[in-house]
Image: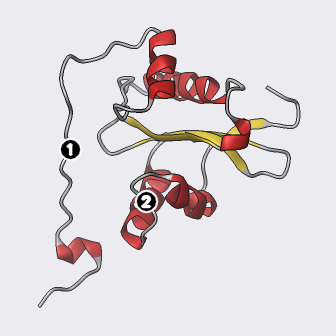
Amino acid sequence: MSSSLRLTYLSVADVDLLNQTWSRGGNEQCRRYITNLISCFPSVCVRDDKGNPVSWSMMDQFATMCHGYTMPEHRRKGYNRLVILTLARKLQSRGFPCQGNIVDDNTTSINLAKSIHGDFLPCRFHRLILTPPSFSGQVHP
């Protein structure tokens, strides 16, 4: 890792960037969800010399590593590998399993998982998360 980069964690100040770069993000509900994840669960982030996130991942409420991303101009430098391995060690040291989900067409992340000897379940995984209106801040008549 370059000496101008540092390994740290995510902050709620990063939520807008994470919401913009997440494939399911871009709306206020996802923004609140990401804010809660950052506030409540472990994360790892590589930052540039100005403190901007370069590569990151965090844990969700299901003890799953999620929302991993590396900014396009910083890809293929090993930052995601560093983030994933650091977060896995952090989670294991706190008694959590090391697990994650990868979208089927994300071959780069699949190849990374294989290179660090990740095991893949022989099934598809679907998660349905419902937020009751009383928790989402939306009131329905």
Q: Is residue 92 left or right of residue 10?
A: left
Looking at numbered disc 2 in the image, what kind of residue is underneath it?
Gly
Residue 92 numbered mark, or none: none
Direction from residue 29 to residue 80 in the image, left or right: right
In-image side of 50 versus 62 (left or right): right
Q: Is residue 111 above or below residue 23?
A: above
Looking at the rendered image, the quarter that the C terminus falls into is bottom left
Which of 10/21 is in front?
Answer: 21
Q: Which image quarter: residue 56?
A: top right
**Which quarter of the rendering shows the N terminus?**
top right
Asked where in the image residue 134 lies, by quadrant, the reply is bottom left
Write the residue at 74% across / 52% down: 52
Viewer can see residue 12: no
Q: Earlier in the sequence, mark 1 or mark 2?
A: 2
**Within-10-Å neighbours for mark 2: few <14, some 14–19, many 20+:** some
Q: Secondary structure at mark 1?
A: loop
Residue 48 seen from this side: yes
Quickly name the residue at label 1.
127
Front one among 36 and 84:
84
Q: Residue at x 51, y 19 (%)?
A: 112
- Is mark 1 in CB contact (under 8 Å) with mark 2? no
Q: Residue type at mark 1: give it.
A: Arg
Number of numbered callouts drawn: 2
Element assignment for label 2: loop
Q: Residue furthest right?
A: 3
Return the x and y of residue 21 as percentages of the image width and height: 54, 53
Image point (60%, 59%), residue name: 17
Residue 89 in the image: state x and y as whole percent.
52, 21
Relative to 27, does residue 121 appear above or below in the rendering? above
| Residue bearing mark 2 | 25
Measured in 3D between alpha carbons, the distance from the residue under mark 1 to the one under mark 2, in whole angstroms, is 16 Å
